Amino acid sequence: MKRSWPATILAFVMALIGIVLTIGGAWLASLGGSLYYFIAGISMLVSAWLLFKGRLLGGWIYLGLFVLSAVWGFAEARGNAWAMVPWLVAPLVLLIAVLLVMPTMSVAANRWKFAGGGIALGVIFVAASFALLGAGGDQVIAALPAQSSPGMNDPSGFATGADWQAYGGTNAAWRYTPLTQITPDNVGKLRKVWEVHTGGMPTSPDYAKLYGTENTPLKVGNLLYTCTAKNVIVALDAATGKPQWRVDPHVPDAWIPYTTACRGVAYYKVPGAAANSLCASRIIEGTLDSRLIAVDALTGKPCTDFNGTGQQDTKIGMGWVPPGSASINSAPTIVRGILVVPHQILDGQCRCAPSGVIQGFDAKTGKLAWAWDMMHPDWTGYPPKGQVWARGTPNSWATSAGDEKLGLVYLPIGNMADDYISAGRTPQANQYASSLVAIDVTTGKPRWDFQTVSKDVWDYDIGSQPSLVDYHGTPALLVPSKQGDLYVLDRATGKPLTPVGSIAAPLGGVEPMERAARQIVSLWHTLRKPDLVESDMWGMSPIDQMVCRIQYRQADYRGFYTPPRPDKFTVQYPGYNGGSDWGSVSVDPVRGVIIANYNDMPNYVRLVPREAANRQHIVPRFATSEPPSKPHEIDPQWGVPYAVKVDAGWRMPFTKLMCKRPPYGGIRAIDLATGRTLWDRPFGTARENGPFNVPTMLPFAIGTPNNGGAVTTASGLVFIAAATDGLIRAIDERSGKVLWSVPLPAGGQATPIVYQQDGREFLVIFAGGHHFMETPMGDSVIAYALPR
């Protein structure tokens, strides 16, 4: 019979795929990996040859390979439907092509009926496989307690409900409201009632690429307060969104650090001040160029009793501070009239970075009350003449919490700027880095500290705001970590109230004498998943899945805390985005439930010797004229022998898909009394995600990366955006099921708030997007409410 040209063309395609799989499969097998890809490659080559020769056996061989792939993938999926994508989707497309060309090679009377039936069976088989496995990752483990606590004590002196007076609702940082107007039964009727574009964006296109406002507004009285990417403070009418006033501190673009983050502003009411006097109540903001701005809460006029100008420069005493190297991106915390101000010190640049000094300013006068420089603990104010606060010390960039009764502020401390090398750090840095430190606001001295990782070389800052809780009658502090561990500490002493243990940590790396043989872990609760295995690798097809498996086998990965090294990549899991990050957790103080959204992604890390980095002109931001928005795969880490290359999320360069299979993020309910998981679900859909960064618009829960926090209501709802799918949603606190969701005009990488105005309950979020999360940029403050 005549040659079938469709079969010939398909044979060439299959031969190319077979060659790649055979070579790559042999390579993977030589590294100790799966034999499947080598077997599949040989089978594809045989099938291609037979199809080229016009023999139907070639089609039957591929059909057998498809069945083998499905069975093999099913065995490795471990109940995760998304894990079946590379095993079934691309192979099914090829199977359909094979079934379509087989009739062109046959003289049978019903050859096209065979092809159609085969395609239908193949599609049904794939659909059934996904249905059998389900979404993957859903766990409903126990019923939510109706009420496990009579109500916790909030020592801040104010409450949520009508208002939202601090970043976490109050200084207790519960992210909870007692409001009940919006319920699980009526939440589906929520509608957008107003949207305001705040503006206040960077003017330079290069700096605009660093967008990511991360803002949580405040609501006090009739006004809503927000800040924009460039620190413009905007006051809106809380009921209508109508702008009331705005204050622009004119932050230069050059001072934008890694992200244009203005997570929030602080509200302060001056004790004893006449109600109608100027600045009796005030809004205080920290800016990206490290100033404090104090304005009247009702009018926006400068508070001239605050340092005489309404402004205070917090860089005084730091010495040389290159633009962008020190910023205030989180709202200051006010305890007993002291404005506690930490700074974000730009990561990865230089061990010579500005100081991570913690400062306390009088919230009325703006004068420095104290400063804590861990290298100069005897200094109580500004440095002596001719000296500066110690450079390069660990900094605190996340939002702190405060206890008005104890007079303590609880500071999440980060790492040094050279995150991935610990040799040469001072004893003080080794003591306080990646710790939670309680500072006495009266003296500015540490009361206690609790460290979550020893000699951190994984960028495991504490990035979450801690929450003040009651734990079996003891005033306690809930501390989430990037590693995924949750600790409960005595607020007064820092002693753990829940079990804490240690695990054996991998040794070696570039500085083996620096590595601790054991690292602390929480034995009470962790958001961390089990260690990665080769079958956790993923892709859109068997080929990119195989490439990720090869990368996995080539890397050094010996589990949690594998140290970085220069001779090969290492896998860091979880990556530096968490676990829990700046979105923190929400606490229902009545039911005694923690709501924690979390990330579940690895990083692919390699140290770069200084000589190699110099050849590539990898230098700190202050030593180059290139815009900071230019993508750099390598951070310079000047001052230590190695730069570092970090592939955050560990993605394939071509498809942009992550090498680890989904989910990449989840949301979990935890019983505070016991640490028991109540439910755990993948968080975020695939609608705005896909290969080559092309949205698939699939509404299925895949579990996306997420940044931003949740708000819990007394009616049993959890409001959250955070994921990369562009949705804000309401989740049933009891079951974890999504009850309502609507798309946002930009990424929702921020924490929403809930308040009441004129008898109406409002849900408000700042939709600004985020460059790191690759969500669309925006400047919208949006309010949702039930119809009147």
Image (tube, rainbow, N blue to C red):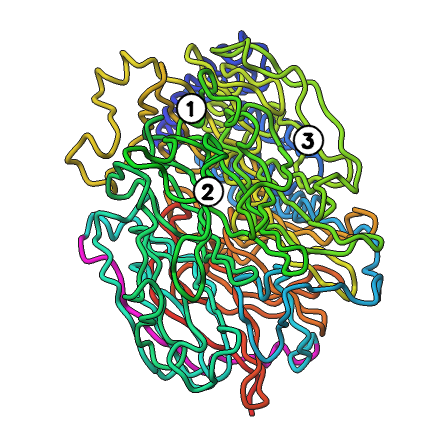
Point out the residue furthest to the front here.
385
Q: Amino acid at mark 2?
A: Thr
Q: Is residue 164 above or below residue 771?
A: below
Residue 69: say if magenta: no
Q: Which residue is mark 2?
A: 380
Tell me what residue is drawn at x 29 percent, y 59 percent: 230
- Give the crowd class for mark 2: few <14, some 14-19, many >=20 residues within 10 Å: some
Numbered range of the magenta stretch: 185-204
> Which mark, by number, is residue 530?
3
Cβ atoms at labels 1 and 3 below 8 Å apart: no
Q: CA distance from mark 1 to mark 3?
A: 33 Å
Q: Earlier in the sequence, mark 1 or mark 3?
A: 1
Q: Earlier in the sequence, mark 2 or mark 1?
A: 1
Tell me what residue is drawn at x 41 percent, y 70 percent: 283
Q: Closer to the camera: disc 1 or disc 3?
A: 3
Q: Amino acid at mark 1?
A: Ile
Residue 198's spot in the image, x, y percent? 32, 71
